[in-house]
Amino acid sequence: DCLEEWDIKRIFCITVDNATANTSALRKFKAGFLQQHGNDALVLNGDFLHMRCATHILNLIVKEGLMEVDDNITAIRNGIQYVRSSTPRLQSFEYRVESGKMTRGSLPLDVKTRWNSTYLMLDQALKFRLAFNKMKANEKPYLDYFKEMVEGKERIGPPTDCDWEVVDRLVQFLHIFYNSTLVLSASKSVAAHKIYNEIVTITRTISLVGDNSGDDNELKYKALSMLGKLKKYWNPFREATDKGKDKNCQMNKLLILASVFDPRKKMKFALMCFEMLYGKDSLEYGILSDSMLDLMKRLFDEYSASASKNTSSSGTANSQGQGVSSTHSQDQVRCEVFSKRTLANGVGYERMDNLFEELVQQSGFEESQNEVDLYLKENLENPKLMKGTEYDVLSWWMRNSLKFPILSLVARDILAVQVSSVASESAFSTSGRMLDPHRSCLTHYMIEVLMCTEQWLKCEIHFNEKGVSTIEQMLSDVELQDDLMREFEPEFNL
């Protein structure tokens, strides 16, 4: 119903989370949409329609890593709760930090349902490991705190050396996913061309940790477990189970192809990633490189055919609307008709201007066919950006749209693909939507106030059924009215 209301008749891809129900839902949607709008309603017949949310997948991988270390994390969390529970305890902790010549800093408490706040808490707590050990050795109230009964059990802790070592390894994993989630969950800039870099970075890092873990079987097991979850969703090759049924989800190859449309990378970056993952002489390297070129040309051919169809239909409409102009005299019409005749002895009558027009059209078609090759053969862009600024890949394609008229249309749609269906705040959450990673001391009322205020600032404001886009717009309208009143006030007085 929404698609009909918005008059959407062609779809490139749809980004959803990784729920199994979405797979079957999109399968039914694909069949129904094609039946309703024809075979051209989906790009490439909908082969790449289903885009799984990248941040949901990252969240699943992180959960896999957190699954068996809950007690270790709880021990450190309880230690931090003790320090933050009163001013004397905090002063005692700060004294031990100063006496141990440790770097001073805040000691945040996490929100259990948000793994990013857990990561930040553990990362900071590791810097004060010595201070916690001193409290464990010399501070009796600290030890008594863990003997208190909570829900019929003693508190977990205080943190032991084993707890610190386990958490230290965990933080190394979480750091990878923390940075990647920030990149992929951006809501105000395109991220499609960045995702393959994050996928390969995570895959290689976890693989190296697993291979170089030595005798640390626990670390190796954790790395292999997380890697298995990653490959379930981001493996470009299908893997059949023993029963012959494919339980793994094939990676949408648009995630790889999007990096090719970054003029700073093109195919060279993708080929480097294939080499790092599989080896340059491997079968996988050849299959993926060929499939990327094939997919790029298939998209180009489909967009080229669509552009030609639109051009011809608009040309027909213009000719029907204008009729025959005065410059097209009857003599000219007769000349065009006569140009199609055959002279005596089978000799064909061909006008040179007609032959030249055919030559121009043919050369133009051949040049357009080489847009892909031309783009890939050109040197990589190497812009010098100021620190903190981001390269605008969409602007590059807009500036070069005359040079690559068809390929720029493909790039526009591929780079617009949403690789994540959630913003960064939701991406870190293992439960519902929250406001801030460290809101432990806020009352429920204050959280509600902040949530409502945030939504009011984001959403459209309606006043007397007249839409005002933002509060800033409403204020600017008031200022404009004041300026007009001051400008025309002398005329009103007259």
Image (spheres, rainbow, N blue to C red):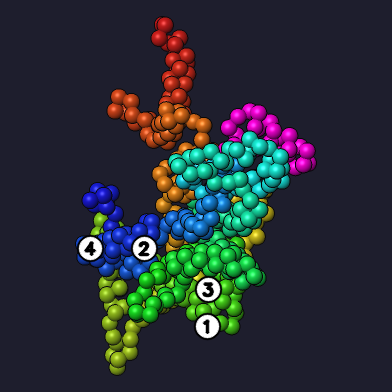
> Tag 3, which secondary structure?
helix
| Viewer-nearest of discs 1 and 4 | 1
Tell me if residue 273 comes above or below residue 152 in the rendering. Answer: below
Task: Label the magenta part by its dominant secondary structure.
Answer: helix
Q: Residue at x 30, y 73 (%)?
A: 336
Label of residue 50 in the image = 2
**How far, Cα to Cα, is label 1 from label 4?**
38 Å
- Read off the magenta span: 80-106
Across the whole image, how many numbered discs are drawn on residues? Answer: 4
Question: From this viewpoint, is residue 135 visible?
Answer: yes
Q: Which of marks 2 and 1 is nearer the N terminus?
A: 2
Residue situated in front as seen by the camera: 476 or 133: 133
**How far, Cα to Cα, is label 2 from label 4?**
15 Å
Label of residue 373 in the image = 3
Label of residue 283 in the image = 1
Q: Earlier in the sequence, mark 3 or mark 1?
A: 1
Question: From this viewpoint, is residue 425 visible?
Answer: no
| Viewer-nearest of discs 4 and 3 | 4
Q: What residue type is labelled 4?
A: Gly
Tell me if residue 491 comes above or below residue 293 in the rendering. Answer: above
Q: Name the residue under label 4.
A: 32
- Circle 3 packing at 10 Å, graded few (<14), some (14-19), many (20+), is few
Q: Residue furthest left?
A: 36
Q: Which residue is drawn at 48% across and 65% down?
A: 230
**How far, Cα to Cα, is label 2 from label 1?**
26 Å
Which part of the image, by quadrant, shows the C terminus? top left
